[in-house]
Image (cartoon, helix red, strand yellow):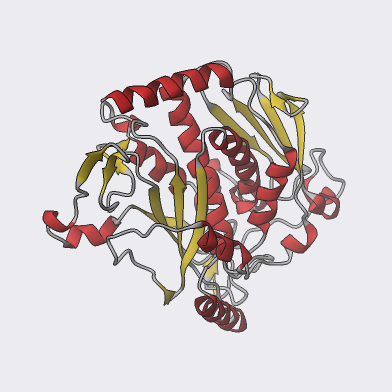
Amino acid sequence: MFRFLTAGESHGPALVAIVEGIPAGVPFSRAAVDEQLRRRQGGYGRGGRMKIEKDHVEVISGVRHGRTLGSPITLRVENRDWANWRDRMGDEPPETPPEPVTRLRPGHADFTGAVKYGLDDVRDVIERASSRETAARVAVGAVCRQLLLAFGVAIHSHVLAIAEIGQAAADAPDIPAHDQAFWDRVEASEMRCADADLTARMIARILEGKRQGDTCGGVFEVEATGVPAGLGSYSQWDRRLSARLAQALMSIPSAKGVAIGGGFALAGLPGSRVHDILRHDPDHGWHHLTNRAGGIEGGISNGEPIWARVAVKPIPTLAHPLPSADIRTRENLDLGRYERSDVCVVPAAGVVGEAMIAITLVDAWLEKFGGDSLVEMRRHYEGYLASLARD
């Protein structure tokens, strides 16, 4: 069984993750985890925190000499900013309590978290609700990617839109196939966008938002190739791969919508223009002529690339705050509060999306192929592919 937990506060000493279920013998590179952490910290529009943190992973357990052991893997990512927050975030009661945070930000977890846990200092909420937690998830995703890579699965993301700039809606039901040159351009772009002109327009839009003391949302797209048919199941609602992917992607802070394949655009088309025609031939085996389903039919992967789009709302911390209220006094306020933040997180959210796709696919992979070691899992996997070829 695959599972993982993350722990840690945004300005605490560190973020920690424990990953259980990764089989023994998977090649492991700490540098590969650090690379994913670096990618998460990039993207135009990030705030001052990224100038402080230079994320690196410490592997505490579960790996020896570049191979997983089959036991739980423990990962730790230090928060360098902890040195500046010891008096406000230490575990011991302070001699002088820090000033409480009581002004609520619209759109954040401030209000709901304070109400749920009976708190009147919002600092207790925002430290865990912060998107800083996603660094731990990206580290977990990087471990999962190394397992998937052993079977030829690749995961990528790119930005489709920032605010009104770009392709915000899935208005083209035919999902294009992207080659390595496309993804190389994405990785070279500050916006994680392959189109240089569109990148420049996105940056200009973020700058405009920053000048206005505002923030920008957008849409990213994530792709997984090399996924065989057969992951997931229609037998129970919570085993459907599409449902699991949607939940994983919606767990990303600021995510407000997920579309698999053509998504909402397909609802406005007749069935004859939506469903992917299936073919079989000796050279390609089973394959579809289009991929409007985004690689999933009936809650099960169908062998085509898995595609999902995620709508990311503008983050709620504004340099020119909206009207708000005080959690302690119940007083209505003309202005909320500002806490150091980003202007746009869409490129970074795409990297987190890749991690969540990797985590979800590994869960489904272990469910399908099992095995306590990579050798055993590969034997199951190859036997399954051989049975598909015979069919």
Q: Is residue 276 left or right of residue 364?
A: left
Please tell me which residue is depicted at 70% across the width and 56% down the height of the picture: 100
Please tell me which residue is depicted at 79% across the width and 59% down the height of the picture: 52
Q: Position of residue 284 (x, y in %)?
A: 32, 41
Report the front residue among 289 and 156: 289
Q: Is residue 142 left or right of residue 1?
A: right
Please tell me which residue is depicted at 69% across the width and 49% down the height of the picture: 35
Residue 146 lies, with reference to residue 45, above or below; the image says: above
Residue 30 visible here:
yes
Report the front residue among 99 and 149: 149
Q: Look at the image and tell me in which quarter the C terminus lies.
A: top left
Q: Position of residue 201 (x, y in %)?
A: 52, 81
**Which corner quadrant of the image does residue 344 belong to?**
bottom right
In the rendered image, the residue lying farthest to the front is: 282
Residue 97 lies, with reference to residue 195, above or below; the image says: above
**Which corner quadrant of the image does residue 271 belong to?**
bottom left
Please tell me which residue is depicted at 61% across the width and 29% down the height of the picture: 19
Residue 110 visible here:
no
Q: Position of residue 278 (x, y in %)?
A: 21, 43
